């Protein structure tokens, strides 16, 4: 079974006003933070600002292009099933899983629930999202791991929001096979996957 962030989780983030709270990113995040709201309130107070916005039009139309075939083999092996969904409630997505391995999988969702990017997630820190962990930014694109609960050690799962602009995010989720739970931080693995996705977006692959 592949983990895909539920539409309800994304919707909870989307329904948050942008002026709630003032969360600040902690160690590892290298992007700048916004000291105050812009004209449309994005990014919100304390939310990392994106360096250069990326055009994700192609990948929204072909979400399984987010990772190359070689990258999928390196992540999950050769017996992998890709499942695109252009009409998912959370946005266009692709999930990859291994039929003979319970749970292990990767998913990428081009979030279209709202247009306020990371601001929606930061506003729900410590309320809806009890698990909230800013990750190291890559090439000016901030990332944050988040969830209603911390499932890293219990279920080997982690979801990361990757900001492609101040208004847009991609959700990258991984689920480890049962035998790998507890041996590697799934959020570190999700960060690695998100970095690969970002590289492909920049290269236009």
Image: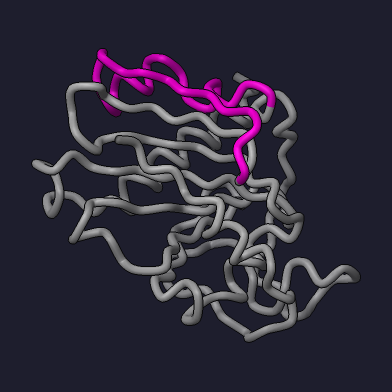
Where does the N terminus fall, quadrant-wise?
top left
Q: Nearer the viewer, residue 37 or 92?
A: 92
Q: Position of residue 151 (x, y in %)?
A: 28, 61
Looking at the image, is 74 positioned above or below residue 125? above
Q: Does residue 82 belong to the magenta stretch?
A: yes
- Image quarter for residue 53? top right
Which quarter of the figure is the C terminus placed in?
top right
186 relative position to 128: left or right: left
- In this picture, is 201 found above or below 125? above
Residue 58 is left or right of residue 198, and the answer is right
Is 43 left, or right, of 126 in this rendering? right
Q: Residue at x 23, y 51 (%)?
A: 156
> Residue 69: x, y in percent?
41, 15
Residue 155, percent from left and from top: 22, 54
Residue occupying the point 50% across, 29% down: 94
- Total numbered circles: 0
Give me the residue at 34% from left, 36% from top: 2
For residue 121, above or below residue 173 = below
Q: Where is 107 relative to 20, above or below? A: above
Residue drawn where x is 76% and y is 55% of the image: 115
Colour mode of the rendering: one colour
Q: x, y percentage for residue 63?
A: 58, 26
What is the magenta range?
61-89
- Residue 17 painted magenta: no
Which residue is at the far bottom?
Answer: 21
Which corner quadrant of the image does residue 167 belong to? bottom right
Towards the viewer: 140 or 24: 24
Seen from this angle, which residue lies furthest right? 39
């Amino acid at each position: 079974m592949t983990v895909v962030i539920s539409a309800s989780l994304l919707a909870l983030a989307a329904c948050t006003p942008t002026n709630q709270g003032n969360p600040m990113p902690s160690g590892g995040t290298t992007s700048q933070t916004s000291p105050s709201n812009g004209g449309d309130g994005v990014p919100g107070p304390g939310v990392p600002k994106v360096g250069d916005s990326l055009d994700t039009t192609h990948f929204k139309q072909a979400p399984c292009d987010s990772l190359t075939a070689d990258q999928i083999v390196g992540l999950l092996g050769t017996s992998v099933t890709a499942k695109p969904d252009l009409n998912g409630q959370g946005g266009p997505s692709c999930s990859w899983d291994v039929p003979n391995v319970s749970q292990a999988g990767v998913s990428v969702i081009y979030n279209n629930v709202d247009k306020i990017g990371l601001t929606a997630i930061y506003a729900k820190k410590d309320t809806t999202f009890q698990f909230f962990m800013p990750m190291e930014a890559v090439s000016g694109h901030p990332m944050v791991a988040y969830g209603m609960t911390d499932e890293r050690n219990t279920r080997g799962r982690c979801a990361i929001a990757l900001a492609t602009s101040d208004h847009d995010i991609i959700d990258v989720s991984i689920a480890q096979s049962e035998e790998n739970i507890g041996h590697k931080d799934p959020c570190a693995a999700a960060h690695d996957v998100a970095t690969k996705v970002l590289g492909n977006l920049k290269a236009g692959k």
